[in-house]
Image (tube, rainbow, N blue to C red):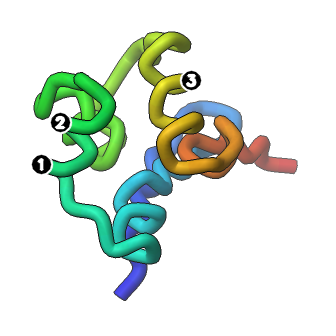
Amino acid sequence: MKKIKQVEIEKGYYLFKLGQILADKNININKLMRDTNTDFKVIKRIMDGDIVRIDIIVLARLCDYLNCNMTDIVEYIRKN
């Protein structure tokens, strides 16, 4: 099952892919939270696409821990 959340906006959409990365790497939210010193609510909001702003420091911390790029976690796709 895909754990990617799509959030539509006016001229495109965002894909929030953190849930899929965690599933692929068999990492649960609690482990990610402890290992990256990131608040549970912040991680959950990124997974659910329920955010307005992203803290780039948190995003960098997640990327370092998960050995991925920012676009692997959050991607913006513009509609044609």
Q: Residue at x 43, y 71 (%)?
A: 25
Q: Residue at x 33, y 74 (%)?
A: 26
Q: Which of marks 3 and 1 precedes in the sequence?
A: 1
Q: Residue at x 49, y 56 (%)?
A: 17
Q: Is the C-beta separation of discs 2 and 1 under 8 Å?
A: yes
Q: Is residue 23 above or below residue 61?
A: below
Mark 2: secondary structure: helix
Mark 1: few, some, or many residues within 10 Å (few <14, many ≥20)?
Answer: few
Please tell me which residue lies in front, 7 or 30.
30
Mark 3: secondary structure: helix
Residue at the spot of label 1? 30
Q: Is residue 71 above or below residue 59?
A: below
> Dividing the image into 4 quarters, which one contains the N terminus?
bottom left
Q: Position of residue 65 (x, y in %)?
A: 49, 41
Q: Position of residue 62 (x, y in %)?
A: 46, 35
**Based on the displayed image, in which of its 4 quarters is residue 74 positioned?**
top right
**Based on the displayed image, in which of its 4 quarters is residue 10 positioned?**
top right
Residue at the spot of label 3? 60
Q: What amino acid is labelled 1 in the image?
A: Asn
Residue at the spot of label 2? 34
Which circle, 2 or 3, is nearer the viewer?
Answer: 2
Q: Mark 2 to mark 1: distance in Å?
A: 6 Å
Q: Identify the residue at the far right of this view.
A: 80
Q: Position of residue 19 (x, y in %)?
A: 35, 60
Q: Identify the residue at the far front of this view.
A: 35
Q: Residue at x 65, y 43 (%)?
A: 75
